[in-house]
Amino acid sequence: MRRSLLKPFDAWSEVFISDPLTTHIAIKLSKIPGIHPLHITAISQFLKFFGAAFYFIYPDPFTVIPPILFFFGILFDAMDGKIARLTGKDIELHGTLDFTTDQITIVVFYLSMLFAFESKSALIPWMYVWMLMLFILISLTSTLHRLQASLGGVNVDNRDELREKYDEIFSSTIHNSFLKKILETYSKMIEKASKYRVFPRPTTPDSEFLFFVIFPILVGIDSPFAIYILITSVLFFIPDIFHIGALDMILTKRLGNLNKDKP
């Protein structure tokens, strides 16, 4: 039963931290009469906003309360999908609403961190770089969604169906033997990682976990490792940027070839 509640693939932080802590609780919560996934989403966003408000009201970098509140927000965010699958009360709007509110809370909490960490001048440039990398990744992901919509007849939410379509596109679009070898190697890595339900690379949620939870906690306890975790959170964007950027280029080339073939 628990396995059916979990995504077939997920971020490292979700698989190894959020899922072990939330799956059992989600099962318990789903048995509460009248419970709805949106209730859990609302609690999640409230905790994150509350953490940001704490930074704005008490702009002290040496407090660990805001990142702890954000962490609990992450845990509740990990439960709403599980409760939706358990109760069957999920609605089509939920995914869009969850994504939109997540982006809003990320921006608000980020701004609150900049406000609270103003005295930490050595950290601020890397915090700006982090947001720039996130912006680049969101732009590339938006382009990918638009290109996926042009595939036609493919359910992009079905990972196996989408992977079959990608394999077909890659074989007909990529002719360089070196690139083909890289794709084959990456496919094998995905297959091995699938046994543990993780992606074979760090993803955006992993970077966000480091940036919004681990990094400010280390700053709060005045740890010298805070700067290294901050830099790591920036580096964690790079595999996703290369991966999604490559997909964008391949799909764009594929569409260009199809347009050339049209009479």
Image (cartoon, helix red, strand yellow):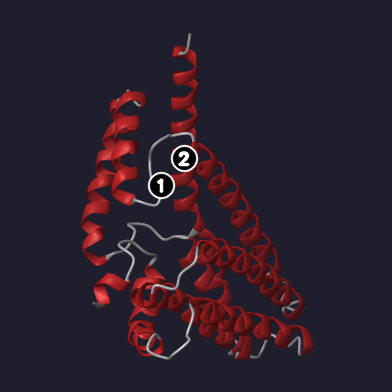
Instruction: Identify the residue under disc 2.
Output: 148
Quadrant assignment, res 24 = bottom left
Q: Could you give the CA–CA distance between mark 1 and mark 2, rounded to whole angstroms?
A: 7 Å
Is residue 103 placed above or below 76 in the rendered structure? above
How far across and down, in percent of the image, does residue 13 sit?
A: 41, 72
From the viewer's perspective, is 176 left or right of 13?
A: left
Circles 1 and 2: CB atoms closer than 8 Å: yes
**Looking at this view, is 86 or 209 the one in front?**
86
Q: For the residue marked with disc 2, what is the amino acid?
A: Gln
Q: For the residue marked with disc 1, what is the amino acid?
A: Val
How far across and down, in percent of the image, does residue 210 sit?
A: 51, 73
Kind of element beneath mark 2: helix
Residue at (47, 45) in percent of width and height:
244
Q: Is residue 169 visible?
A: yes
Is residue 234 placed above or below 190 in the rendered structure? below
From the viewer's perspective, is 171 left or right of 223?
A: left
10 Å crowding of disc 1: few (<14), some (14-19), many (20+)? some
Is residue 250 placed above or below 64 in the rendered structure? above
How far across and down, in percent of the image, does residue 240 sit?
A: 46, 52
Instruction: Identify the residue under disc 1.
Output: 156
